[in-house]
Amino acid sequence: MSSFNAYGKVDEAEQAKLEACRKRRKGIAIISLSSIILVGVVVAAVFGTRAGSGSKNGGGVGGDKSPATSIKAICDFTSYPETCYSSLASLPNSTQVEPVDVFKLAIQVAMTELSNAAQRLSEPSVLGGSADNRTAGALEICQELFSLAMDHLNLTLSAGSTSLFQVMDDLKTWLSSAVTYQETCIDGFENANGTLKTAIVNHLKNSTEATSNGLAITTFISDVLGSLKLRRLMSLPDRHDEQPTWLHSKDRKLLQTADLRRKANIVVAKDGSSKYRTITDALNAVPNNSDHRFVIYVKKGVYYENVQVGTNKWNVVMVGDGMTSTVVSANLNAVDGTGTYQTATFAVLGQGFIAKDMGFCNTAGAIKQQAVALMSNSDKSIFYRCQIDAFQDTLYVHANRQFYRECNIYGTVDFIFGDAVVVFQNCNIFAKVPMPGQQNTITAQGKSDPRQITGISIHDCTISPSGDLTSVQTYLGRPWKDFSTTVILCSNLGSLINPAGWLPWVGTSAPSTIFYSEYRNYGPGSSTKNRVKWKGVKNLNANLASRFSVGSFINGSDWIPAIVPFKSGL
C-alpha cells in the first residue's frame, strides 16, 4: 500500500522571504484600510446599499473611488495579490463593487482551479516514471482531499450567498479546511523525487493561491465588519446549560436522555446478540445526510476493524460501554506501507459526529512509526470520555471544529497533530516510552496560511508520563508548519516536560510566524523561566488567553449539546 508522509518541513530561508513579502503587503493593506471612503464602500455594499446612491455622479460615500481601486485594496490584503487581480478582473466592468460579489467570485475561482487541479492529477502522465505504489496511493488520497475541499467551498458559497456577515465563523472554518486539504495532498509527496514533488506543487499552485485568497477576502470583510462592531461577538457568554439553537426539538429531547443507550437506533454487539456485529455494518444502515441525530450503541468488546464514518453520514452519535470496555482496534501503519492519512483505526468525515464512552487504539507499536488511532475531519465533532491510544501520530485532528472533553490520550512523537480548530478540555494527556533515541513531542500543529483560524488549545488538562521517562526528553510540541499555533492554558504540567518547553522542527529555532503560548499553568513542568526564546513564543494576558476558550475559539456554546459538559470561558 501507499506511503502518505504528512511531514512537510519548514524551509526557513523561504519562510523569511515570504514573511518579508507579507509585511510589505500588510503595510499596503493598512494604508488602504485606513481610508474612510473604502470602509464606507465595503460596509454600504454588505448592507445592500449602492455606493453612489443619492448622487447623479456617484457622489455618495466612496463616489470618487473606482471599483478597480476598491478591488486593488482588497487584493492587496491577500497573500497572492496578482492572482487576485487577474481572477477578479471582470468585476470592474460594473458600476460598483459589492464585497459579497467579490467574495462569491473568489470562491467560484477557487472551485474552478481546484477542479482543474483534480483533473490534471488524474491524468496518467502526472507520475511520469514514478508510478510506484506509494506515489500512486498519494494521488488517490489527493483526489479524496480535493473532494472534501470542493464540499467545503460549496458550503462556503451557499452559506455566503444568504447572509454573509452572520456566518463568518462557518465560512472561515470551511475555507481554512479547504487550505488544509490541499496542503495535506502536497505533503503526501514529501519523500517523492524532487521533480515529482515540484510538479505536484505546480499543478496545485493556482488552486492553493485562489483558496488562500478566498480566505483572505473573507477575513477582510469580517475585519471591516468587526471594526465597526457589526459582526456578532466572538466571545459568547457562559451559557453551557442552554440547548443549542440548531438542534431539532426531537434531537434536544434525545440528547437530554440520561442514558443514550436505551434510545439507540442501532445496537452493535460483537457476541451476536444484536443484528449488527460490526460498526462498519451499522454505519452502512445510517441514513445519508440526515439533519437528525442517529444513535449507535456499541456494546462492550474489542472490535478489530478499520472504521470510516463517511462524508454523507451526518449527526451520528456513537455510544459505548466505557473508554476501556468498548474499543475499536487496528494496526495499519507507515512502515508496512500504509499512508499516515489512511492508517487511522477510526476516521470521521461526516459532520456533527459525537463519540461517548469509546476507545480507539492503534496497536502497531512505536517501531512502526506513524500509526493513527483516531482521525477527525468532522466539523463540530465531539469526543467525550474517550480513550485514544497509540504511539507516533495517535490523534490526527485534521480539519474543522472539534472538541475533546475528559478524554485520555496516549502517545509519543507528535501524537496530537493536524490543522483543526480544536479545544481539549479536562483531558489527561499521557506521554509513553518511545523508540530508543526518540524524543516525545505532544503536539505538531499544521497551520500553513496566516489567515486560517486553526490551532490547538489545551485547556484545564493534565500532562503526565505513562511509563518510565527518566531518560526521555518530552516537549510540549514542535512547529510543523510556518504558522503553527498551539496554546496550553490553566493545565497541570508534570515534571516530564523539558524546561525548554518547545522543540524546533528543523535547526535550532522556529519561524517567527508561529504562535506558541502558555497561560496560568501549574505543576513541576510549568515554569517558563527556561523556555526557548523564539519570537513566536508569546506571553498572553487574560483577554488574549480567553480567545482560545471553548466559547470563543470554536464557538462551542452554539453547538455543543447538553450531554457534554464544558466550560465556555477560562
Image (cartoon, rainbow, N blue to C red):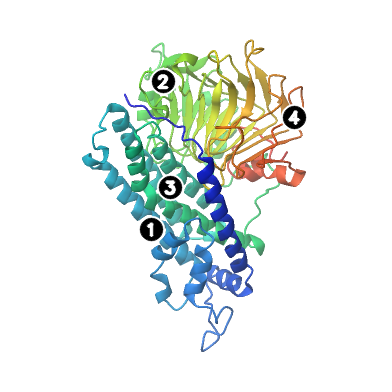
The number of numbered discs placed on residues in the rendered structure image is: 4
Image location of residue 193, percent across then percent down: 34, 34
Amino acid on which the number 3 mark rests in the picture: His
How far apart in space, not on screen, are marks 2 and 4 (Cα)? 36 Å
Residue to which mark 1 is pinned: 109
Q: Nearer the viewer, mark 3 or mark 4?
A: 4
Specify the label residue 530 is tagged with. 4
Q: Mark 3 and mark 2: span between their CA atoms?
A: 28 Å
Q: Which percent across, then down, holds residue 445?
A: 55, 35
What residue type is disc 4 on?
A: Asn
Q: Earlier in the sequence, mark 3 or mark 4?
A: 3
Q: Are marks 2 and 4 in contact (CB under 8 Å)?
A: no
| Quadrant of the rendered image containing residue 252 | top right
* Earlier sequence position, callout 2 versus callout 4: 2
What residue do we see at 69% from left, 43% from top?
239
Q: Secondary structure at mark 1?
A: helix
Residue 488, placed above or below residue 331: below
Considering only order in the chain, which callout, 1 or 4, is on the residue closer to the N terminus?
A: 1
Whichever of callouts 3 and 2 sits on the residue coming sooner in the sequence is 3
- Who is closer to the viewer here, 470 or 227? 470
Secondary structure at badge 3 equals helix
Question: How many C-alpha atoms fall within 10 Å of the one at disc 4: few (<14), some, or many (≥20)?
Answer: few
Query: Which dot marks residue 152?
Result: 3
Q: CA distance from mark 3 to mark 4?
A: 42 Å
What whole-number distance in Å separates the C-alpha atoms at marks 1 and 3?
14 Å
